[in-house]
Structure formats: C-alpha cells, structure tokens
Amino acid sequence: MRGGPQVIPRPEKFRLGEKAPWERADITIPERISCNEIKRILSKTKLNKIPATYQEAWLGTSLTPRQRVAAEKALNSAKPTSSVLVPLFDDVNGNAHTVLTRRSQMVKSHTGEVSFPGGKVETDESIDQAALRETFEEVGILPENVTLIGHLEAMPTVASGSWIVPLVGLLNPDSFVDARPEYAINPGEVERVFDIALTDLMVAGVYREEIWEFPGFGEGPVGFFEVEGDTIWGATARIIRNFLEVIIGTHKVAQSSTR
C-alpha cells in the first residue's frame, strides 16, 4: 500500500498544484535507466564535480518566497552545512535504484520521515566525508564501497536555517548480498531502509504537488511521492524531483552567485 505512517502537517486549506515535469506530453519516461547512464548525464550537465562548499552546489534555480527567506536565513547563519548521500545501484535488469531511510522514532527532529542518509558537516571534515560517515553510521554502508559521481543542487531549509548538499554515489556491487546492498541499521537513527527504482518514482500517480499557504510567506508548492509503505515529502522530495528533472533533461542549470 502506498503512503506511510508519518504525520504530514497539512493545512486545513490547500489545493493541488501542477503536474510533474515527467508527465508532460513531450517527455518520454525511459523504461529503465542505468547507473552508467546517470553518470553520463551528470557529466554532460557538469554536475559531476564534488563541491567543497554549498555555494559550489547551489545552482540558483527559482525559489518560492518561503525558500528565498530560508536562503537568506541560511546565508546569514553560522550553522554548519549538511550533506546527504543519494546512493545508487543497478538491479539485475540494469535499472538504477536509490536507497532511502525512514528516520527512527527516537530522533529529535523529522521523526518517522523518509530521508537520504546524511547529516551535519563537522568542522574537521569535508562535505563528502560527512555524507559517507553519516551513511556508514546510519545504515552500515562502508565509505570504500561508495564511488561519488556528482552532486545535485544545494537547497536551503526553513526549519534549520542551513544548507543541504546532496551527493550522488554508486554502491559497489561486490559488497552486495543476493544482488542487493547489505545494511547494518542503527536503530537509534533509522527504523527502515529500502530502495526504489528511479523509473518507478515517475509512474503516474506516485508524485503530486500541493499548494500550501505559509503564514507570512504566501502560497508555495509542496511535493509528495507516495511509495510502497511510505510518503516522501519535504526536502527529500525536493531532492528527488531535482534528480529526476536532471535525468529527463528538464532541469535548467544556471549558476548563481551567493554572498
């Protein structure tokens, strides 16, 4: 069954937003897409570098009023950048899957929400080191079993006033068990780990956009992916949408400067 147990703080009044970019009549969704093809796309779109700072990963896409406030807050904040890993592997049919987690009921923030493994970048480490360290701590994937192939756009978060930098990494199939990654879940941080084919995220009815009213900011879009057993929304849904747009070619890369 699609949808998950987490509580969505949906306002009383909302309306449906626009359809997903991959639902446009002029877009053909591939039946499958391999990790090698994704690597080629990241290289073609110049997203194949590993950024040293959030500025290098911020592509300057259009922001809603609420996101602009979040960007200003993040730019002026002393809080550290966060980084997440978007892990990829091919199934037996050569179709790329990504790995996601459901956060434990014991964590202080975003309890029960779906996210990519990751966390805050410590003062003595780089963005990529933080993503790999957090991934190992949360789901047991060893850093040496990940090959980083690029990044997605950094995004500001309203709640924390910081930046999230998503890094894309290929998982080493030599470390798999029965053709899938082997996990060692940290129950203090993660209660579920699962994977899903990127093409399945573009199936009709999985994604929807809602328009919410944010007090003091006006209306803004909120995206949702309804998958088996969980609902993906918030920053994670924004990362996935960005990734899928890069894959199908509708994401426009326009480097923007920051202060």
Image (spheres, helix red, strand yellow):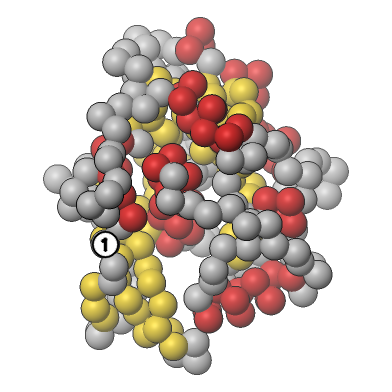
In the image, residue 38 above or below residue 2: above
Query: Is 118 displayed left or right of 5 in the figure?
Result: right
Is residue 97 positioned above or below 203 on the image?
Answer: above
Q: Quadrant of residue 112?
A: bottom left
Three-letter residue code for mark 1:
Lys
Residue under the point 71% across and 37% down: 50
User: SS of the residue at dot 1?
Assistant: loop
Name the residue nearer the viewer: 142 or 32.
32
If the image is split into quadrants, where does the C terminus sit? bottom right
Residue at the extreme front of the image, as rendered: 26
Numbered circles on residues, count? 1
- The residue at the far bottom in this view is 216
Q: Position of residue 221 (x, y in %)?
A: 38, 72
Q: Residues within 10 Å of mark 1 (few under 14, many from 20)?
A: some
Name of the residue lying farthest toward the right: 124
Residue 119 visible within the image = no
Residue toward you, 45 or 2? 45
In the picture, the quarter occupied by the N terminus is top left
Determine the image quadrant of residue 163: bottom right
* Location of residue 222 in the rendering, given as x and y in whole percent from the top left corner: 37, 68
Measured as percent of width and height from the top left, residue 14 is found at 26, 80
Residue depicted at x 85% and y 43%: 124
Which residue is the site of mark 1?
Answer: 19
Residue at 27%, 49% in the rendered image = 26
Residue 169 place in picture, x, y as percent = 57, 30
In the picture, measured across the screen, residue 90 lies left or right of residue 31, that is: right
Q: Residue at x 64, y 39 (%)?
A: 46
210, 122: nearer the viewer = 210
Q: Is residue 38 visible?
A: yes
